Image (cartoon, grey):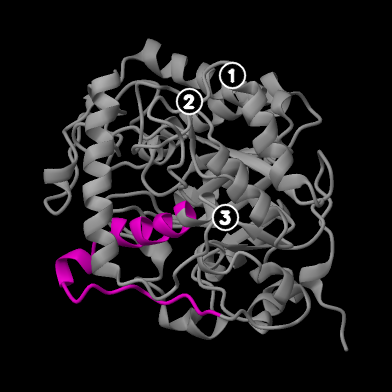
Amino acid sequence: MTERLIAQPLALARGRAIPNRIAKSALSEALGTLDNRVTPELVRLYRRWGAGGAGLLITGNVMVDRRALGEPGNVVVEDERDLLMLQQWAAAGSARGTRVWMQINHPGKQAPRGMNRENVAPSAISFGERLAPFFPVPRALANAEIEEIITRFGNTAAIAKKAGFDGVQLHGAHGYLISQFLSPHHNQREDAWGGTAVKRRRFVTQLFREVRRRVGDDFPVGIKLNSADFQRGGFTEAESLGVINVLDRAGIDLIEISGGTYEEPAMQGLRKKASTVGREAYFLEFADKVRAQSDVPLMVTGGFRSVAGMEGPLRAQALDLVGLGRIFAVEPDAPSRLLRGEETRHQVRPLSTGIRYLDQMGSLEVTWYTRQLHRMGRGGSPVPDENPLKSFVFDLRDKGLGILRTRLRA
């Protein structure tokens, strides 16, 4: 039998080698406390995933500012008050040799109404008509606030390193703050932070330099980046290629390719091109364009279903890591099966409530899978056949209560 490439280690320029080519992409766990601290449930969840065989686990988004939460249950790392629990979190996931990276993030305006005292963004641009009722119009950031956020990313990354995480990933996709700065739709500034593609990418390049300064030259720093926003007037593939070139030259260690936002959720497979259907993954066509100009290590996430579908792009050198997400929520030991050449027991398919409006909301998939993570965090098992409408209703109740409780503590 031909040797499976997914079982081969991947050496990066910095840090320890990743023991195989299967990576868990970030999933929002929402398992933090009301005051945004690490919990035993997070430790328990990552211990289970660490035993599942993946080469790399990337955490759900850890926020850099307690005033800027994306949802109830976010973990926030501003200082070292949770260092012991952070160390336990990192150790739980890496106990069997898996590498664990912390994803760090700022939501910008992508935080539900009532979550924060105010939402901030590059520009005071509201969401589109469909999502506007759920998200307030943000306030445009002042220059000094932008610089402070950059400093905060560097601080959180330094604490992650001290806690024993094997690397960090900047969340630059799916409509969060870095993504907002890159998008000409969301970033309509006319100062040093916007107005041209070069100025719009200044935020992420300055942020990367600050993170690198704080963690040193021996610690991996990656980014999750949209191939495009798939939104009129938004971030395009050409702009994304430009950002990748700049970050590659600056020394980025790993780029995870995704796409879309919660206004246009391409990351959930809803906009897959007919030309790529046979290749399973959603963003391989864009990965080919990256490969034509750069050898930067690539992770592609979204759409992989079979061993053959993963092996093919690896053999073609279209990518270096296979990013999986939702399968980890219903089958936490899926990597072990894949590494043995076996198919997963479950297949990830689009969820449907039967209500078109709900089915088109990018948050439906997030809420259903988050409930499965909560079950594992409590020591239970996922329920792969849970009714999506039931899950949505319960999550709506829980999230509403979580927002209220979070604001009461503020």
Where is mark 3, residue-wise?
25
Task: Indicate the amino acid at tag 1.
Answer: Asn
> How far apart are labels 3 and 2 at the CA level?
19 Å
Give the x, y percent position of residue 335: 69, 68
Residue at image coords 21%, 48%: 397
Compare residues 406 and 246 and report the one nearer the observer.
406
Please name the residue that numbered disc 1 is placed on: 155
Disc 2 target residue? 64
Say above or below: 142 vs 111: above
Work out which quarter of the rendered image holds the C terminus and state it: top left
The residue carrying pointer 2 sits among few (fewer than 14), some (14 to 19) or many (20 or more) residues within 10 Å by Cα, namely: many
Structural distance between the alpha carbons of marks 1 and 3: 23 Å
Name the foreground residue: 216 vs 317.
216
Q: Which residue range is magenta in the image?
A: 346-374
Residues at circles 1 and 2 in contact by the CB criterion of under 8 Å: yes
Does dot 2 land on a helix, a strand or a loop? loop
Residue that appears at 49% across and 40% down:
61
Left or right: 251 as drawn, with respect to 265: right
Q: Is residue 336 magenta?
A: no
Left or right relative to 253: residue 200? left
Q: Are marks 3 and 2 in contact (CB under 8 Å)?
A: no
Task: Residue at 36% x, 54% y: name it.
Answer: 229
Q: Is residue 341 above or below residue 167?
A: below
In the rendered image, residue 358 lying in the magenta stretch gets the answer yes
Q: Decide: few, some or many residues near mark 1? Use Cα within 10 Å; few <14, some 14-19, many ≥20.
A: some
Q: In whole angstroms, how far apart are the C-alphas of marks 1 and 2? A: 8 Å
